[in-house]
Amino acid sequence: MVRAYLLLAWTWLRASAQYPASLALLTAGSFVINGLDVAAIWVIFTHTSTLAGFTLPEVMFLYGTAGLSFALADLLFGNVDRLSQHIRTGTFDTMLIRPVSPFVQMAADRFGVHRLGRCAQAVAVLAISLAQLAVPGGRAWLIPVMIVCGTVIFAAVFALGGALQFLLTDAPEVANAFTYGGAQLTQYPLSVYGEQLVRGVTFILPLAFVNWQPALYVLDRDDPLGLPGWLRFASPVAALALSGVAALAWRAGLRRYRSTGH
Amino acid sequence: MIEAEGLGRTFKVRRAVVHAVRDLSFTVGAGEFVGCLGPNGAGKSTTIKMLTGILAPSSGRIRVAGLDPSRRRKALARRIGVVFGQRTTLWWDLPLRDSFELIRLLYKVDRARFAERLDEMCDVLDLGAFLRTPVRQLSLGQRMRGDLAAALLHDPDVLVLDEPTIGLDVVSKAGVREFLLRTNATRGTTVLLTTHDLGDIEKLCRRVLLIDHGRLAFDGSVAGLRALVPDETSIEDVVARLYVSSTPAGSPRTRPRPPADGLPSGTA
């Protein structure tokens, strides 16, 4: 699977290298657009010194970790959200006749480095926040773990969104509500949202484990909702569980695939 | 090589259940060359999609090269080649040569055998002139030759083609036909194709399956098909009579249709 992914990704990279100017513009554009997100956070902090009890570097930490996880998942699997387009134009059929998982083919389709723009911006924000936070080494070990788990969680959300498109071929935007919506949601301390929503993204669609729960440990904070302490380390479990659900949903969707025409 | 037994596929269209294919049974032996005829919407493409594992059947049983297509899709992909006349299976922005190389890697074809196969294809299909051209810039005839080569690079046991000659000029058409005959004869590849071009049927197929309203309406030789309508001389007229006689008089061909059994069934 990894081999097939790399082969396809490399092929697409070479194809996109035919248009170097377009590549550079897309990458720069993605960096700038995501930069505006950070500007929005900065604007908030010119009016207040804390957001739901979190300081600017802390919010940037939450933003940077969620942003990096999402950017990596998007880089590797984000194209899955174009499934309905492939179904409508019939190109998904051609993926089904190859000896490679259609999920891998979808994920690698049109792989491009322009998605690195988002990664670069998230890394920059994370680096700035870490420089100001001075997290002790005893807590910092959780940072790479949370980024990996966050990436897996977002990848699973992309797969779930893809699976949904087998049923809702005409409404891919429904899936975007969860993928891009999830990315937006996790950029801020979850305590700015209502308690029911936070419980929902902790126990139902476990976005809280992308960054919120582990970040509470890294930043040495109490959970504003008073949820048990072991949840801070539960990200790997949440990531695995959600991946399992996503894999089942994708398979079920594929069985229900009805192609186009008759 | 291909076995279908009581094969059925239904689609739900706004709560109505449409039977695209129903109770279809046939077998194709190794090395056969079979053509599949039928009016638009008869269920040919649905059948092809079930044979290639793209669609899971709603009922019945299929085996292609001994495999259940929709459950063993990846294993099946190595045993069959598929060509869609209406769309390419190649990578739009890649030069033909790179598409072939990618196929070699994805199918894990041995490098020496691949080179040998590719040489042969270039020779027979005359691909040399546009091997370095991106697929999107190829003419339909060139693209179809590229698609044929791509479907056969891994030396499959079965070749399935959905309208391979659609839109081709007479010269390209003749080239494709000759290539298919040659592949079938020299490699013993089992070929199943759908077509609306009766020339394909007459020139290529030793056996014809006529599908209508999702059912098998005829299975036999071209001569047998002609014998169904003895007073017509050209194969076009024979088939036109068969298609028309299965449609309720004067009604446009729309889906879903009531079952009509205007065709003689299973004469072979």
Image (spheres, rainbow, N blue to C red):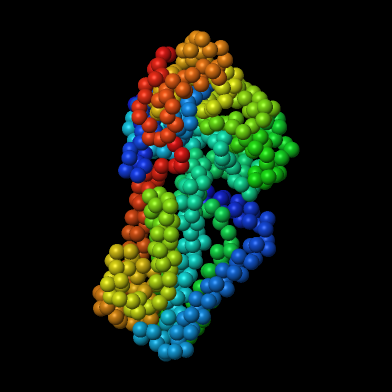
Q: Which of B11 and A50 is in front in this view?
A: B11
Q: Which of A195 and B259 is in front in this view?
A: B259
Q: In the rendered image of this protein, does residue A92 appear above or below residue B266?
A: below
Query: Which residue is pictured at 42% across the width and 74% down the height?
Result: A187
Query: Which residue is pictured at 49% across the width and 37% down the height?
Result: B77
Residue B9 shows up from this direction:
no
Query: Which residue is pictured at 55% across the width and 43% down the height?
Result: B106
Kindly give the residue lying farthest to the front in the view shown. Answer: B250
What quarter of the picture does the C terminus of chain B occupy?
top left
Q: Quadrant of residue B116?
A: top right
Percent across and percent down for residue A99 are 49, 41
Percent across and percent down for residue A73 are 47, 62
Percent across and percent down for residue A25 are 64, 66
Q: In the rendered image of this protein, does residue A101 appear above or below residue B233?
A: below
What quarter of the picture does the N terminus of chain B occupy?
top left
Residue A29 shows up from this direction:
yes
Q: In the rendered image of this protein, does residue A32 appear above or below residue A81?
A: below
Query: Which residue is pictured at 35% across the width and 27% down the height?
Result: B259
Q: Is residue B248 left or right of residue A17?
A: left
Numbered circles on residues, count: 0
Percent across and percent down for residue B265 are 39, 17
Q: Quadrant of residue B257?
A: top left
Q: In the rendered image of this protein, does residue B158 appear above or below residue B17?
A: above
Q: In which quarter of the image is residue B98?
A: top right
